[in-house]
Image: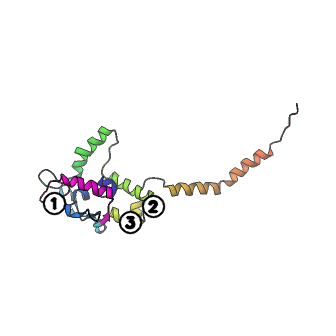
Amino acid sequence: MILAETGIRGGEICGLRIEDLDLEGAVVHVRQSVWRGQLQTVKSRRGNRRFAISVELTEHLRAFLRSWRLNALGLLFATGNGTPWDHSLVRKRKFHPILKKLGIPQCGFHAFRHGNATLLDQIGTPMAVRLNRLGHAEAQTTMGYTHVVTEDERKTADELGKILHVNARNEEVEQFERRPLTLRIQ
């Protein structure tokens, strides 16, 4: 649920700490990442960010924290011995088997970023908000994550069709009008 709503990177979710969650304000801070099981800084300057989360995700996180086990690093998700998760191993050992069981084609956690960017586009989220949530510096990068024909695009195509293809409709009407009429009298 966190990946789908936030669109954060796999390494970023593994680097989330309890102190990165402001559940009263419904905000998540992304301040670090994990690569091959090691904590590191985020991918870029824009990767260090904060953004709002939904009431539903906030409640989901509260429920999760009721069974959360303290670890030395304060990580939201940690191995049994308190070290950071390696998102590649979680993907291979946990996520892929779940997808297989559900009959869903195999994908990685990055698919959630693409899905999130697509949803943000569909609901008309301002580009500045999308850039911040995804940690991108350029709108072009964010748009590369968007994979559907939006309602605006569909409306635009339909309107262009009405304007540009009026001649084809006129020709059809003219052909119909040119046919000789025959009357049958019985």
Q: How is the image coloured?
A: rainbow
**Upstream in sequence: badge 2 or badge 1:** 1
Circle 1: element type: loop
**Image quadrant for the C terminus?**
top right
Circle 2: element type: loop
Coordinates of residue 4 in the picture (x, y in percent)? 33, 53
Q: Which residues are magenta?
A: 50-79
Between 68 and 108, the residue placed more toward the observer is 68
Question: What's the residue at 86%, 34% (across, down)?
Answer: 184
Q: Is residue 136 left or right of residue 90?
A: right
Name the residue that disc number 2 marks. 124
Q: Amino acid at mark 2?
A: Gly
Asked which quadrant contains residue 157, the reply is bottom right
Coordinates of residue 185 in the picture (x, y in percent)? 88, 33
The residue carrying pointer 2 sits among few (fewer than 14), some (14 to 19) or many (20 or more) residues within 10 Å by Cα, namely few
Residue 129 numbered mark, or none: 3
Q: CA distance from mark 1 to mark 3?
A: 28 Å
Coordinates of residue 74 in the picture (x, y in percent)? 16, 60
Name the residue that disc number 1 marks. 74
